[in-house]
Image (cartoon, rainbow, N blue to C red):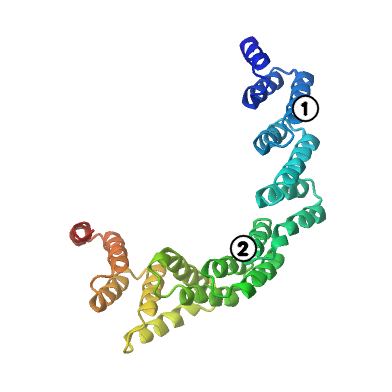
Amino acid sequence: MRQVEQVARVAPGEPRIQLELADRYHKKNQRAKALALAKAISGRFPDDAGVHSALAEMYSRWNEEKLALHEYETLVRIEPSDDTHLVNLGEQYHQRGDKARAEEIWKRIAAARTPEAWARLAEVYAEHDMGKEAIETYGKALALKPRDAQLMRGLAAVLERQRQDDRAVDAWQRVLELTAGDATKKPLRREARTRIVAILYRRAGSPLTAKLRDWQRRFEARPADVEAGYLLVEGLLKVGRYDDARRQLGAILALDPKDLDAKHQLVAVLRSLRRYDEAVKLLKELAASS
């Protein structure tokens, strides 16, 4: 402690050392000294966002809620365009039960009224189980940027959490449409397929069974609907029909032997079927082609 005090005295302009000393005072139950030093630090660096962010975190750890709230408000003043500060400030009020004040602050995130700003606000609503507000706000973002797959993904996820299954399936299907032919969006496409199948699987009346037949019919049509083939694979795996999934992946690869996604998925299916020799052989082929 004494050594840190000495360093702090000779380096008053170094906030990291001052903050460390204040924290040490608090850990030693010297609350008054800790608070006095923290207040001095705040005054010495009035426009340093990093310092005030550290103070907000430190006050929160000390259970000094009013002081933490003041620091979060200071951060909004220093960097009004940084929506992270608005999110954190609103969170402080939300945790105190003042949801109206929290929402009032969060709405400022969308002040720019851009698709990105509306989407960020929608994310905050979704994180706080404000499903109705999140859906409405994603709608505003998509009205400005209707072909943005990430925005549609956000809407689909909220609809799913709200158990609006039909709308969620439609939104995930729209994600597939918006990402068609874009190799960089393959992970998003896989997620969309997984969510569509999961929603259909959990619904009463087994709508997934009917969909499996529909996807089979669409894949077997000419020209083949390859996306339907992928959905069929996902559905077959969901209901435990691994051998049928293996055959379906083989049919997809017959149409396009270079389909790496199908090959990687086939490796996983072969492992599940304990057909290890075939899985290893396919892995070697993938390694050789990479």
Instruction: From this view, report whether residue 49 is shown above or below residue 135.
Output: above
Residue ID at (65%, 60%): 126
Mark earlier in primary sequence (1, 2)? 1
Q: Which residue is labeled 2 in the image?
A: 116
Estimate the x, y position of residue 41 in percent, counting from the top left: 73, 27
Q: Nearer the viewer, residue 182 or 287?
A: 182
- Residue 130 visible: no
Is 42 or 100 nearer to us in this picture? 42
Q: Quadrant of the N terminus?
A: top right
Q: Vertical placement of 52 versus 145: above or below? A: above
For residue 189, say whether it is visible: yes
Q: Residue at x 67, y 65 (%)?
A: 134
The residue carrying mark 1 is 39
**Amino acid marked by disc 2:** Glu
Residue 6 falls left or right of residue 38:
left
Q: Is residue 26 left or right of residue 32?
A: left
Residue drawn at the location 66% of the way across and 20% of the way down? 21
Image x and y of residue 167, in percent: 59, 76
Q: Position of residue 107 (x, y in %)?
A: 74, 59
Q: CA distance from mark 1 to mark 2?
A: 36 Å
